[in-house]
Image (cartoon, grey):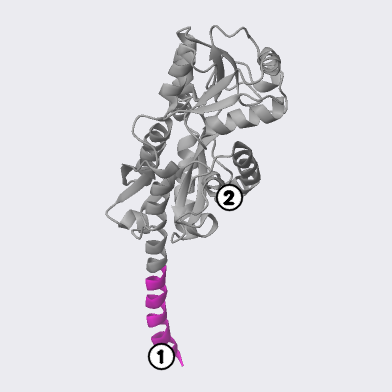
Amino acid sequence: MSIRSSWLRRPFSGLLASLLALCLMAGTAWAQSGKTLRFVVGYPPGGSGDFVTRTVGEAIAAELGVTPVIDNRPGAAGNLATEIVVKSTDGATLLVASNPYINKALYKKLPYDVEKDLIPVTLLGNGPMIIAVNNNLPVQTIPQLIAYAKKNPGKLNFASSGNGSSPHLSGILFNSVAEVDIVHIPFKGGAPAVQSVIAGDTQVIYGTSPVVLPQVRGGRVRALSITTQKESLAIPGIMGMKEAGLADYDISFSFGLYAPSSWSAAEVQKVFDAAVKVLKRPEMREKLATQGMDPAPNASPADFKAANLREAPMWAKLIAASGAKVD
């Protein structure tokens, strides 16, 4: 009996060790794939999306002991980058993007399935936009802007960085909540949009902090409020919308981290833990503040997924109201 028992234990313990080794390898497939972690972002170099990807992505990779690869793939409002990630098979590729339900509402057909092909990991950062006006417009506050728009129907235009962008949808929400009709004028990026306001070709802009704040500080446009309820630590000195007088208005832009559906729960959790650790660092808050953003890690990947789903109806409603559609 004792001899047979000993013979059974030896191969079983060896099998157990082998299974444990396989589990550990499966949980770190991205780390075994050339020791690199690729972050694909659907924005060109130099913008807020690129900045967040490089700043947070490089720190996450360092925390995990791997080399970061930042891959800028602008095009089709981020769909090109998303398609690259969902089709990746190396187990070491992640996506940095805004809420994918925006594009689901904006495009009739997508080359991927938001629910089936993407795993939300965590929100990286979010931030309000700034509502600013041309210096010659006779308004100093949000209530004055609303009153002016109602007295002068069809005479005000708002500039944004493009159809379906967060600034565009911010303007659509403002029109709805304030019950005004400020006409949307899309531009190819935030820089030409704010220049149009400076020149007086448009009168109002909803724009990100890196685009608008330097013009505010330079006295070339006048800031009325940020687009979130409360004042942001990342954009000091500009009141939130609740204080500005439009308590039902609240919208922000954000960038999150997503994995392809081929990733295991263990792989997702490992990156999530590293991201949360990085985002809680004081120096990371300071870096994101240069883009008018605050670090915003979720409680868990499931929490991030739930947050995206909660926002989905809002984005769908705004996009339907805007009339923006892309074939």
Magenta extent: 1-20
The secondary structure type at the circle numbered 1 is: helix
Q: In which quarter of the image is residue 247?
A: top right
The residue at 46%/93% (across/down) is 1
Q: Which of 315 and 283 is in front in this view?
A: 315
The secondary structure type at the circle numbered 2 is: helix
The spot of residue 187 in percent (x, y) is: 45, 28
Q: How crowded is mark 2: few (under 14 residues within 10 Å), some or many (20 or more)?
A: many
Q: Residue 31 carries which label?
A: none
Q: Earlier in the sequence, mark 2 or mark 1?
A: 1
Q: Which residue lies furthest to the front in this view?
A: 154
Main secondary-structure element of the magenta-colored stretch: helix
Q: Residues within 10 Å of mark 1 (few under 14, many from 20)?
A: few
Q: Name the residue under label 2.
A: 305
Q: Nearer the viewer, residue 168 or 258?
A: 168
The spot of residue 158 in percent (x, y) is: 55, 23
In the image, residue 102 sits, relative to residue 174, either above or below, namely below
The residue at 39%/47% (across/down) is 81
The residue at 58%/50% (across/down) is 305
Q: Name the residue under label 1.
A: 3
User: In the rendered structure, which amino acid carries the disc numbered 2?
Assistant: Lys
Foreground disc of the pair 2, 1: 2
Q: Nearer the viewer, residue 19 or 204?
A: 204
In the image, residue 54 sits, relative to residue 86, either above or below, namely above
Q: Residue furthest left?
A: 34
The spot of residue 248 in percent (x, y) is: 72, 28
The spot of residue 13 in percent (x, y) is: 41, 76
In space, the residues marked 2 and 1 are separated at their CA atoms by 54 Å
